[in-house]
Image (cartoon, rainbow, N blue to C red):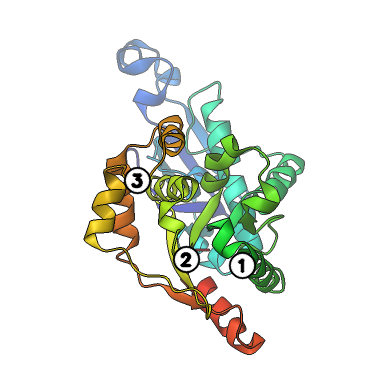
Amino acid sequence: TDGYHPHSMLCILSGSFFYTLARKHTLLGQLGQLLAPPHVRARKVKVESGKIICEIALWTNWIHTGSMQVLKSGTYLNLNVDTASDIIAAYPEAQRTAHAYGRMVVIQLHHCKNDCTDLTPLEIDFKSLRKVTVKFMTEGHCIFLTHFKKEAGTEAALMQEALTNKIQSDPQNVAHYLEHPVFLDTENLEDLAKLRDHILASRNLVVLLTPGVFERPWCLVEIVTAFKQNRNIVLVEIQKPDMKFEYPDEEFICDLCDGRLFSETDMQVFSLEQIEMVDIEVALRHVLTKIALPFSPHKASSIRDVEIKAILQRCVM
């Protein structure tokens, strides 16, 4: 029915129907409809078996542009949006393809020369779809590791390897096909100016908690950027015999946010990234409400394996 928000796609299997485009969607307009001869007052289309109605509704918000009446009774397949979403969500690879397909649908609609209707076919080039899908499947990161290199460089590399092995050994993991599922700047990042792009390309920011991590300007830049972009932030406390992380108290936060813990060079980094001290305070207070998970690089591999699994479970896929 015209003006109704559909939540499903119809595939005509048998029978025949008449689809009538609503007057406001015709080229004549409402006044033209009243003045025009009867045979051109409304566009009517006969719809028979094999025709798909309103596939657009599966991929974007849609309102019916006309109404359909039965000419000859038959059967049709009704594919509900929620049902389709549930089925696709159960298969990570299909989910990637669906995301790419949906984006191509929206792009096609934006470039449609004529007004789109319930009968507008979605002419997606499947060769292009494959290229887009591969791009979606291989680009970006599941996890961005934030760490103070002097205190946790070795541990970060160890964690990156362990997390990557877990992800790539599980074909059902959504991040399985990513070229760099776990991003570590010492390995992948050559230009610090691109730091923000890598954070935006990541679903999770895992912060390795060591004594000096919250005093490092680039670590704070990463945390603030992830917080502003609503990325999932996971805290992991590095547990070593010779190092103990102490959670910041109110005095430390005040000194930090007043800039007393930073050099002039550090402050230039924040200025370059357009980050104010209040941004750091808000992001840091948010982060400190989270419960940290442990990572014990010097313990048995069986213990580390359990810790790595726990970290992955805390991450958003």
Q: Sequence order check: which comes first, mark 2 or mark 3?
A: 3
Task: Pick the residue in front: 25 or 314.
Answer: 314
Residue 296 x %, y %: 55, 80
Most distant residue in the right direction: 127
What's the amino acid at mark 3? His
The residue wearing badge 2 is 210
The residue wearing badge 3 is 5
Q: In this picture, is 28 found above or below 60?
A: above
Quarter of the image for the N terminus: give it.
Answer: top left
What's the amino acid at mark 2? Thr
Q: In this picture, is 276 found above or below 141?
A: above
Q: Sequence order check: which comes first, mark 1 or mark 3?
A: 3
Task: Pick the residue in front: 162 or 43.
Answer: 162
> What residue sits 39% from the left and 43% below the top?
262
Judge whether residue 306 can be spotted in this image.
yes
Residue 241 x %, y %: 52, 81
For label 3, the SS is: loop
Q: Is residue 230 left or right of residue 302?
A: left
The residue wearing badge 1 is 91
> What residue sits 54% from the left and 72% below the top?
312
Judge whether residue 143 can be spotted in this image.
no
> What residue sits 51% from the left and 55% below the top?
203
Residue 155 x %, y %: 61, 68
Of badges 2 and 1, the one in the foreground is 2
For label 1, the SS is: loop
